[in-house]
Amino acid sequence: MNYQKKTVVASVAGLTLEGMDIMFISFAMSMIIADFHLDMATGGMLSSITNLGMLAGGILFGILADKFGRVKIFTYTILLFAIGTALTGMATSIEQVYIYRFIAGLGAGGEYGIGMTLVAEAWPRKKQGRASSYVSIGAQFGVILAALLSALILPVWGWRGLFFIGIVPVIFAFIVRKNLNESPVWLAAKNQTQGAGKQGNMKQLFASPRTAFTTFALAIMATVQIAGYNGLMIWLPSILQQSQGLSVSGSALWTISTAVGMIAGMLVFGQVMDRLGMKRAYGIFLFASAAAVYCYSFAAGAPGVLIGGAIVGFFANGMFAGYGALISRYYPMEIRSTATNTIFNFGRALGGLSPILVGFILQHATVTVAMTYLSILYCISFAAMASLRKTKTELEAEGIQPINKAV
């Protein structure tokens, strides 16, 4: 297996394990709440604390990966979220659960951006979109794996037994460290004295007004991506059960059809991005997401709900596949991992609050208003995307000599 394929396999596996770890909380939540005698709000803090850990881990390990190497730090992040997950199963109080979920979040937040950076540096620009899409599908595999393991383990060993499975990624980390070499791009830059002191410097994300604006625009796009996904996936099953009279099994079927649409959207988005370019691909999918989400509020009947869910998933989450390649293109190698981790995990932390607002809207208004809110979010992301301009890094990669530092 060549180096390019190894980076994809390692990153897919890493994101699968990360997605599995995150979804364990969703499937075990009711048991944890009952075991520690919690109210719903206190239990909901578990997700928020994990997201805060992801933000902190994304910044910390992004910087370390730029300074000390992608593969080395990548394995450390996997070990950290494996340890945090396993320790969760041994927690004797909700305070300990919070601490261990924060630790798991630290590792998960670092793993995503480093894996995406490895892939972006290993693959040529004309194939980065599809390579990134292959990696992004790993998160959906993780959801499926978590669902299967939960069905098998929760009835027998309870929620603690489920989290003990988290120690398995330790084996994967050992395999990665043994079989995946360091990024040649990073090694070459490390050997250049001119790169000294610049690696992992967060100030470079705001080095100039244009770079700062780009960082801000990308952060908006990442936030909308997570806000839209969480707003849809957390609330829609219960909404459909009430408004459409779907049973729990029916809403589960909706979840599966939407996930299938998401996977198909990711694969297609990667191809579109490589063939039509970054801005055109995001322009098409963002516009289609805004329209699909709004129209979906008028869906009726089982066929309309299932097909509409798949269409919404196709466009709204298909774009997730491109963020690794998108962010990587706007920053030089010295801060690429720092930028990817910081920007996307900022989006995770802020966008993760979206279900709170959606819940508030649903409590005081209609489903159409809630879906309109999500549709407006995609319009805001479209405006942020349209504001992006080619940077010095992009122009140099295309063999064009820029006149100014950012064009």
Image: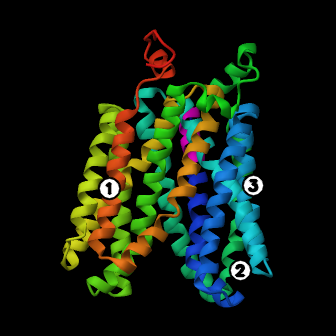
Across and down, in percent, residue 102 comes to 71, 63
Front residue (pair 202, 78): 202
Residue 172 visible at all = no
Front residue (pair 26, 168): 26
Which image quarter holds the C terminus? top left
**For the residues bearing labels 1 and 3, Cβ distance under 8 angstroms:** no
Q: Is residue 334 above or below residue 381?
A: above
Q: Is mark 2 on a helix, strand or loop?
A: helix
Task: Tell me if 330 is positioned left or right of 237 in this view.
Answer: right
Q: Name the residue under label 1.
A: 376
Q: Is residue 355 above or below residue 348?
A: below
Q: What residue type is labelled 3?
A: Leu
In the image, what residue occupies the spot 54% across and 42% down?
Answer: 8
In the image, what residue occupies the spot 70% across and 55% down?
Answer: 106
Q: What residue type is labelled 1?
A: Ile
Q: Give the dominant element type of the magenta stretch: helix, strand or loop.
A: helix
Please tell me which of labels 3 and 2 falls first in the chain: 3
Q: What element carries label 3?
A: helix
Across and down, in percent, residue 86 comes to 75, 69
Is residue 8 inside the magenta stretch? yes
Please rate how many residues cluster around mark 1, counting C-alpha atoms within 10 Å: few if below 14, some from 14 to 19, many from 20. Answer: some
* Image mark for residue 160: 2
- From mark 1 to mark 3, how far is it between C-alphas? 39 Å
Please tell me which of labels 1 and 3 falls first in the chain: 3
Q: Give the range drawn in magenta.
A: 3-11
How many numbered marks have been drawn onto this rendered protein structure?
3
Across and down, in percent, residue 243 comes to 28, 83
* Image mark for residue 79: 3
Q: What residue type is labelled 2?
A: Arg
Please rate how many residues cluster around mark 3, counting C-alpha atoms within 10 Å: few if below 14, some from 14 to 19, many from 20. Answer: many
